[in-house]
């Protein structure tokens, strides 16, 4: 992705006026509905926004879940490669799929947030299954340089079948993993995935 790409951001001061987000915030509607309706939403140059914590980049973060015939939960996980994504997360395991909302996503008549989320999913994975989309929470982790400038919106897609394939080399070793195996990989997970795994699955 180009440093000149225009991406969707919200001032940190707008979020602070609603409340504090630290880690995983379950009360997603309290924050997200005002944010998406705000006249302070704007598009900023990615190269500038990546180092300016006074703005938060909105990032849909989609978790793909499939329950087998015995009711056991499996979650799609992958290892971040060295492609065009966030270099600071290279080689980390992840259970979240998504990315920035671009100015191009706002050129039509639809909701730029939903359009951008679907575009990112279509670019990264092929989902050949019906699913239920559950909006689960918000993610904010200021403990590292990546987390300071991003606000994640966690969606859980509960799929009827595990028919998902990676479309990008940047999503290596992609596949559904049993929860116990994911928990054993906990230290290899990126921070957002650690927070999400704990919040959604204990």
Image: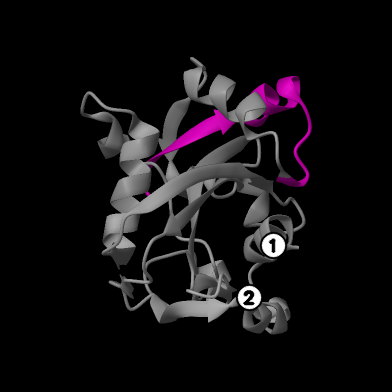
Point out which mark residue 135 bears: none
Task: Please state the horizontal and vertical placement of residue 60, each as a whole percent of the image.
Answer: 48, 47
Instruction: Classify mark 1: residues with Cα within 10 Å, few (<14), some (14-19) or many (20+).
Output: few
Residue on which disc 1 sits: 201
Q: Does residue 78 belong to the magenta stretch?
A: no
At mark 2, the secondary structure is: helix
Q: Which residues are magenta?
A: 2-24
Point out which mark residue 179 bears: 2
Res. 48 in view: yes
Query: In terms of image quadrants, where is residue 193?
Result: bottom right
Q: Vertical placement of 178 versus 12: above or below? A: below
Q: CB atoms at circles 1 and 2 under 8 Å apart?
A: yes
Q: Residue at x 30, y 61 (%)?
A: 129
Task: Please state the horizontal and vertical placement of residue 37, each as a whole percent of the image.
Answer: 49, 18
Locate the C terminus and report the quarter of the image it occupies: bottom right
Reading the chain from its start, which is encountered first: label 1 or label 2?
Answer: 2
Question: How many numbered marks does the figure carry?
Answer: 2
Task: Please state the horizontal and vertical placement of residue 57, each as a whole percent of the image.
Answer: 53, 41
Q: CA distance from mark 1 to mark 2?
A: 8 Å
């Amino acid at each position: 992705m180009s440093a000149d790409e225009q991406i969707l951001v919200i001032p940190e001061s707008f979020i602070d006026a609603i409340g504090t987000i630290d880690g995983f915030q379950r009360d997603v509607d309290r924050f997200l509905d005002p944010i998406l309706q705000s006249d302070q939403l704007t598009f900023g140059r990615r190269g500038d926004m990546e180092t300016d914590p006074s703005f938060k980049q909105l990032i849909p973060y989609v978790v793909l879940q499939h329950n087998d015939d015995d009711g056991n939960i499996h979650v799609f996980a992958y290892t971040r490669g060295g492609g065009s994504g966030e270099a600071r997360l290279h080689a980390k395991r992840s259970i979240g799929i998504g990315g920035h909302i671009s100015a191009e996503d706002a050129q039509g008549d639809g909701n730029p947030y939903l359009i951008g989320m679907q575009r990112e999913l279509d670019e990264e994975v092929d989902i050949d299954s019906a699913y239920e989309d559950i909006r689960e929470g918000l993610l904010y982790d200021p403990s590292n340089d990546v987390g300071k400038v991003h606000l994640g919106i966690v969606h859980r897609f509960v799929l009827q079948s595990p028919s998902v394939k990676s479309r990008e080399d940047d999503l290596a070793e992609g596949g559904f993993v049993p929860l116990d195996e994911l928990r054993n990989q906990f230290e290899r997970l990126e921070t957002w995935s650690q927070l999400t795994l704990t919040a959604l699955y204990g």
